Amino acid sequence: MSTFLDLGLKEPINKALTDLGYEKPTVIQEKAIPQIISSTADLKAFAQTGTGKTAAFSLPIIEQINSSDKNTQAIILSPTRELAVQIGNNIKEFSKYIPDLKVVTVYGGSNIEEQIRGLKRGAQIVVGTPGRTVDLINRRALKLGNVKWLVLDEADEMLNMGFKDELDKVLDATPETKQTLLFSATFPREVEAIARNYMTNPVEITSGEKNQGSDNVTHQYYVVNERTRYQALKRIADVNTDIYAIIFCRTRRETQEVANNLIKDGYSADALHGDLSQQQRDSVMGKFRKKTIQILVATDVAARGLDVTELTHVINHKLPDQIENYNHRSGRTGRAGNKGISVVLVNNKEKGRLRSIERIIKKKFEAKKVPTGKEICQNQLMHLIEKVKATEVNNEQIEEFLPSIYEKLEELTREELIQKFVSLEFNKFLSYYNKSADLNDLSSSRDSSRGRSNDENMTRFFINLGRKDSLNPASLIGLINDQKIADKVEIGAIDILDTFSFFEIDKNFEKETLDAFGSNDPDFNGRSVNIEITKSNRGGGGGRRSRSGGGGFSGKRRSGGNDRGHRGSRGGDSRRRSSDGGSNSPRRSSGDSNASSGFGRKRKRD
């Protein structure tokens, strides 16, 4: 493998890379950097998450940038604030020995006037989310007439989040002579559409096979139902004593609910989703990186850009809406040469989706049994004993207390002392899991979601458009946004069929949705649009329109705002009591006893 010097990067960049601990380029860097430096051809690059894509496109741009020209020469678009901030910070680190090179990161949820002032001072490289970038273009604060490089990072996700119009506007503001660089970890059909629409005869490079999962990640699944899903989640956390994990949920409401239940049950956990302010998100992410928080419950969008190399587990509380996104999730673990485990909780109806994921990642899922109480207690007890063995004794601090301690304990034998110590520290875990149910027996707890809507907080609508009208999830989200129903309405499951479709809206906006579509009289590609409420569930059922859903694209989306993928919802802080222990959870510590097992003691919310 070559060095970064061999790839044609100048000394100031190499010095910065050395300071950061970069020694050898990754495969995608080794392929992309010389290609971008030596050619003006457009580029499609595909590599697994965590293989250094940011350096692969930013280093050759830094190499070629004219730092004496204050005009914006490179625009880098990313789907989320977190990823934009991460890219911006990485570029600043890579270019720290090039003093005249300036980078400005622009995104919604932050002071736009401050961002405008940064642009006025001059920025050769701008990193931004699509919504805020277009806003700044419209205000004439961001001028892209001199752009030489346009980078679309995670472009499939930008389309998935409904940013097609924003991408079109940014493309219109850039010169035709620019070099377009598309980097992605997955290769769905949408990426091919981007290449056809936005690129000219692009060169294609890959690191490994497209969409293939990392060799460092093991994939496991547990069969649960809706009544046992949270209980199983806790048991998986309890049996893995040193777990450091992200739990992925499909919606912000679900994310907050799972996080609330974990916190209530004494776990060191917190939520990361679009309802949080940027300051709150930065605080949560900072604590997670420092391991003050050991479980992060997050949506797919919010976790983009979260660069943590030591995750032991990724847990899919629910499968992602699009199976390609599983690769993004599982790629959060198994980084930097470390091993990782990607866990999926599925019910019997969802198991079939695993086969589709296996075909994409080219790996098999391992079926696992939900841990029993006995297994958890054994693991936790041995973990406690290992921690005791590894504890360093500071004789100077405790020496004066030892004589009285020895005197009080002199009547106890060695065996009795060990037994009392273990009981003091471990009785709560033993009590909690004593005679606990076998969660692998699903026969006595039928899936309560069968025959019901996936989310009782959503209203399901019928719309008279389908695939034959060129309708897809992104265009349907755009159509809903155009009706300006509300600033923060949450869009739920979307099912696109041939001649009609279904979508869900937060039930609090049921009347507003009907009124908006009725009064605006919208059309789609010249066809009049009609919607109505339907009671039918996916897979069949009654209702005013007895049409079945199918071929779905499920999960909530965001409507409205500059950065639609990040705006908050009315949803939020929905809570329920946990069904596997509640306030009696073994994670809750009592008195002054130091909970040595697992994540540690319950922390207070900040």
Image (spheres, helix red, strand yellow):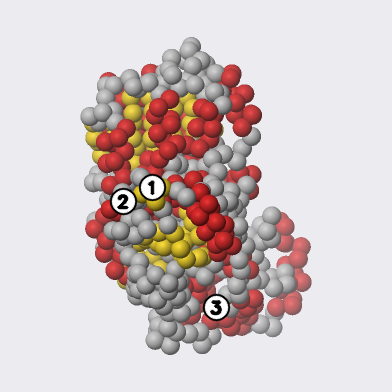
Q: Residue tagged by mark 3?
A: 580
Please tell me which residue is depicted at 50% across the width and 84% down the height of the picture. 436
> Badge 2 is on which residue?
469
Structural crowding at the residue carrying mark 1, measured as other residues with C-alpha within 10 Å and reported as few (<14), some (14–19) or many (≥20): some
Q: Is residue 86 left or right of residue 221?
A: right
Q: Residues within 10 Å of mark 2 (few under 14, many from 20)?
A: some
Which residue extends farthest top? 68
From this view, report whether residue 477 is shown above or below residue 355: above
Q: Is residue 319 above or below residue 124?
A: below
Q: Secondary structure at mark 1?
A: strand
Q: Amino acid at mark 1?
A: Phe
Alpha-carbon span between mark 2 and mark 3: 47 Å
- Relative to 177, residue 560 above or below: below
Residue 590 appearing in the image: yes
Are the residues at dot 2 and dot 1 in contact (C-beta closer than 8 Å)? yes
175 left or right of 122? left
Q: Which residue is mark 1?
A: 524
Q: Nearer the viewer, residue 387 or 295?
A: 295
Q: Earlier in the sequence, mark 3 or mark 1?
A: 1
- The residue positioned 60% from the left and 57% from the top of the image is 570
Residue 445 position in % (x across, y down): 45, 84
Does residue 320 appear anywhere in the picture? no
Relative image position of residue 468 (x, y in whole percent): 28, 53
Q: Amino acid at mark 2?
A: Asp
If the image is split into quadrants, where does the N terminus sit? top left
- The residues bearing labels 2 and 1 have C-alpha atoms spaced at a distance of 8 Å
Q: Position of residue 522 (x, y in %)?
A: 45, 48
**Would you say the residues marked 2 and 3 are in contact, meaning their CB atoms lie under 8 Å apart?**
no
Q: CA distance from mark 3 to mark 1?
A: 48 Å
**Kind of residue indicated by mark 3:** Asp
